[in-house]
Image: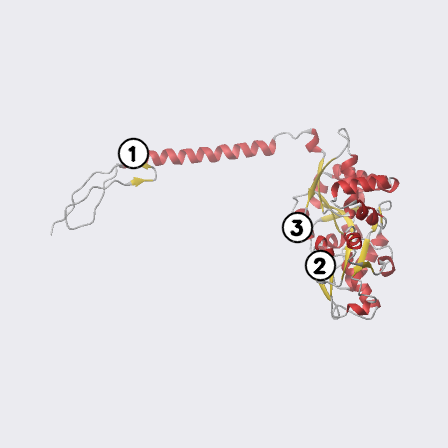
Amino acid sequence: MIFRTRCFETLFHLGFRKVRKWHVSKSPPCYEVERGEVMKKTWYLIIGVVLLVIGGMAYGYHEHHKPKTAQELKTVRVAYLPITHALPVFATKELETADGPVHVELVKYGSWPELMDALNTGKVDAASVLVELGVKAREQGIDVRAAALGHTEGNIIIVNKDINSVQDLKGKSFAIPHKQSTQKILVDCMLEQAGLSEKDVQIVEMSPPEMPSALSVGQIAGYSVAEPFGSLALEMGTGKVFEDPDHLWHDNICCALVFNGQFVDEHHDLAKAFTKAYLDAGTYLDEHPKAQEEISSKYMKFNDQVIERSLKVIGFKDLALTEDRYNALVHHMTHIDLIKKVPAYSEFVDQSLLP
């Protein structure tokens, strides 16, 4: 049987092109494409793509190698979480001047793991971070270097109103912001002094902003945290101050100014200038209590009562990360198995950055 063919128009991705009609007998349709035109358009397309790629690479090279502005040359990108422990970083930013040696670019993060990833990979140049996280990174071979503390004191332990002794915490949940933290060490000290351990209390990691609400609904029985999240629970009327952290670990340290090591190697003078500005900002905060409140209110969205209460238990004058303080820190870290191999003081603290 002979089949009459039908006329087809085929759309090609390189353009609309009519194909010739052919009569076919006892076989599928076949088409003769005007190959010359198609090949020409194909080559035009390939050449266009190649030129586009080359142009993009040239632009990227130009942007990467173009001279930096005076401000860019003295910029330090600093990561932080919005807590009172980062106040010296905020003050450094507030006190900078256009003709000063340092320009601070603040980079806000929502969690410690996210912040540490940015520091370790060089997305930021420095960070106000839990000092234990810095030590742990150094133990793992990551080149981070501390220059100073973030504050003295400033930690708080809060429990619900039904808890009257450490023994009352048995079988209940207790929150900390991160396993690698002074808050974790304080909880372990508290339990150990009462003859308890983590086997008796369920320790859970929780974001500090979630802690006051979790306490109010009974999800947790208490928490150890940096301010202002302890004062927030007191203001809400859902918790009470439990243990004095200084009795658990005298002169406990929590946060530190930590640099990415590569940034220090490549921009040592700038890192040193920032460290001086940071320490000067700490002194300024200590001498100007009103400035503490004003700067805190700008960077942390809490009411005045919470800010005022939280600032009563934190200091910014003595921010030196001394060898004695470091030794006490790593003693506690090894005691509760937070680290196995202790980095030497000189490995972690870069004294060449100090004024």
Q: Quadrant of the C terminus?
A: top right
Residue 290 position, x and y percent, is: 85, 40
Q: Nearer the viewer, residue 348 or 221?
A: 221
- Left-right relation of 122 to 316: left
Residue kind at label 2, given as amino acid type = Ala
Q: Nearer the viewer, residue 293 or 346?
A: 293
Q: Earlier in the sequence, mark 2 or mark 1?
A: 1
Residue kind at label 3, given as amino acid type = Glu
Q: Nearer the viewer, residue 108 or 345?
A: 108
Residue labelled with disc 2:
214
Task: Provide the secondary structure element on which disc 1 rests.
Answer: helix
Residue in the image at 23% along x and 40% along y? 32
Mark 1 and mark 2 in contact (Cβ < 8 Å)?
no
Whether 61 is drawn above or below 326: the answer is above
Mark 3 and mark 1 in contact (Cβ < 8 Å)?
no
Viewer can see residue 275: no
Q: Earlier in the sequence, mark 3 or mark 2?
A: 3
Residue labelled with disc 3:
114
> How much space separates mark 1 and mark 3, taking CA atoms?
54 Å
Residue 4 position, x and y percent, is: 14, 46
Extreme-left residue of the structure? 1
Residue labelled with disc 1:
37
Q: Nearer the viewer, residue 343 or 204?
A: 204
Residue in the image at 82% along x and 51% along y? 154
